[in-house]
Image (cartoon, rainbow, N blue to C red):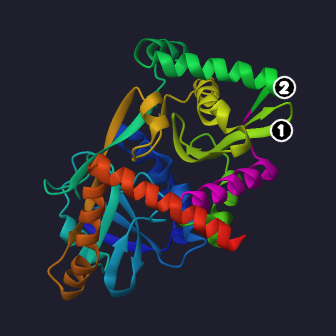
Amino acid sequence: MRVTIVLPRELGPDEVSRWRALQEADPAFDNPFLSPEFTITVGALRRDVRVAIISEGPDIVGFFPYERHPMGIGKPVAAGLTDAQGLVLAKDVELDPRRLIKECALAVYEFDHLVSGQPLLSPQHERYPSPIIDLSDGYGPYTEWLRQNSGKTYKTTLAKSRKLQRDVGELHHEYATTDLGPLRTLLGWKTEQYRRTGRTDRFAHQWIVELVERLLATQSESFAGVLDMVYADGRPVAGHFGLRTRTRLVGWFPAYDTAFAKYSPGLIHHLLMAERSAEAGIQIIDMGRGEKEYKEKLKNGEFEVAEGRVARAVPAAGLHWVMRVPVRKTRAAVLANPLLHRTADKALKTFGRLRTVLQG
């Protein structure tokens, strides 16, 4: 095995084509966060992004995108934003994870959404479900599944959609638009949601705003930013920005106007998005790891992602363990306990309300 480290902008057309071919050869890698376009776009905005090109003899057999932080701490590209992480590798390639991170000048590589089939995986890594909407049989069979398994949610959502149209006006769904206006409306809703729920506002970081705008402008058959918005009588009600490959759409930034909250606009939007996605050839909508009520109501399947780290026996890895692992285990314990989870979520929302009042 030979490993060559490059900046994303140094990848040539042949290397990008090889990356894409490896990705499309294995369904485990069918996720836009693992696409070369995503890493190249993030790399244009962040100096810490690298790509390890893995070769055997004259052949490139894999790509490992990552961020290298001080003290040799490795993280996924756009860590904290991505719902799929890991290598894109040819089948049957044997790889020593610790040798790989040594070649990348890393003491440790940590992850929280590592996809299945990775040589980085080990039995001690925690596994978590990542809910999906499976549209491989089409939208009709999916709604039939909802009727049988989540009938109350499906019927209530349709009823609220009709009421929204009676009260406000006709619904219009704009799918796969590249207009920046609706995107900025959506990001404004998302910022309000972060503040309301006590979370950190990701869009307070200008590079993330620019990343989303650049991804929206990236449109090809194999990779694209997908923005869709639902309107009632011309007024934006709910929307979503995500990324797609040829057959998979990842849920990333869904949001809605809270003025319409009583109509469940998020659920209305997701059903409309699923219908248009299926028409566009999308077979899977990956809603991402995390326990959210709307995901439980809409999912008809799930993938598995892992959280953990690969570390070498060096001092920096030991310091990283002290600083990160106990915190991560505590967070996992809170999320796994319904009572603790509800208590923490309530505390965050209370903090969000107080912060909004003080900032106002």
* Residue 58, quarter of the rendered image: bottom left
Q: Residues within 10 Å of mark 1 (few under 14, many from 20)?
A: some
- Residue at position x 62%, y 72% in the image: 205
Q: Is residue 334 above or below residue 326?
A: above
- Residue at position x 24%, y 49% in the image: 127
Which mark is on residue 169?
Answer: 2
Q: Nearer the viewer, residue 313 or 4?
A: 313
Q: Are marks 1 and 2 in contact (CB under 8 Å)?
A: yes
* Residue 167, quarter of the rendered image: top right
- Residue at position x 37%, y 55% in the image: 343
First to last magenta residue range = 174-198
From the viewer's perspective, tell me whether residue 50 is left or right of residue 257. left
Query: Where is the N terminus found, in terms of image quarters?
Result: bottom left
* Residue 126, quarter of the rendered image: bottom left
Which mark is on residue 235?
Answer: 1
Say whether residue 279 is visible.
yes
Q: Determine the secondary structure under disc 1.
A: strand
Residue 74: horizontal and vertical position, in percent?
Answer: 35, 74
Tally the marks. 2
Residue 46: horizontal and vertical position, in percent?
Answer: 55, 75
Which mark is on residue 315?
Answer: none
Tell me if residue 16 is in the magenta stretch. Answer: no
Tell me if residue 197 is in the magenta stretch. Answer: yes
Residue 120: horizontal and vertical position, in percent?
Answer: 23, 59
From the viewer's perspective, tell me whether residue 195 is left or right of residue 338. right
Q: Amino acid at mark 1?
A: Arg
Q: Amino acid at mark 2?
A: Gly
Q: Nearer the viewer, residue 207 or 3?
A: 207
Q: Is residue 331 above or below residue 297?
A: below
